[in-house]
Image (spheres, rainbow, N blue to C red):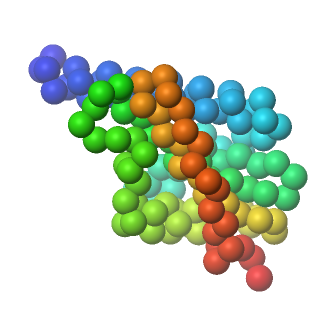
Amino acid sequence: MTISSKRGSKARLRGRWAERATLWLMWLKGWSLVAHNLQVGRWELDLLMSRGEELRLLEVKFRRAGAWTSADTAVSFEQRLRLQGALRSYLDRVPWPGTITFQRVSWSGTVLVFHKAENWISLKIH
């Protein structure tokens, strides 16, 4: 196994750990799991959670402490558009009549930041 494949394997393992920890924290806040690592075409939706009439897509990013790039800035504008498109494809098959929101969750080592949730009203069924 090469050094780069070992790093990639560790990064995936840490990312899955961050997703699982985020899931548990959301459960403690009263959210229910709708889907985890959902493949929609070429894209993956990390966590889809619901509470009441709200459906929330959480994009979880993990970076090791002291990494060159921050997990806080790891979701680009283009990635947001891809996530919206993937979620739209999911909602075409499984309509959601309530509010739809998006939230970035970033981990830097063991430091967690839940960024402000964004209302994705354009994806709501009219």
Q: Considering only vertical position in the picture, is 89 above or below 14?
A: below
Q: Considering only vertical position in the picture, is 49 above or below 98?
A: above
Q: Position of residue 14 (x, y in %)?
A: 41, 25
- Of residues 77 and 123, which is closer to you in this image? 77
Which residue reaches farthest right? 52
Residue 115 appears in the figure: yes
The image quarter containing residue 12 is: top left
Quarter containing the N terminus: top left
Q: Residue at x 48, y 40 (%)?
A: 106
Q: Considering only vertical position in the picture, is 100 above or below 116?
A: below
Which residue reaches farthest bottom? 126
Quarter containing the C terminus: bottom right
Q: Residue at x 38, y 50 (%)?
A: 73
Q: Residue at x 82, y 48 (%)?
A: 51
Left or right, 86 with respect to 125, comes to left
Left or right, 113 with respect to 55, comes to left
- Of residues 9 and 112, which is closer to you in this image? 112
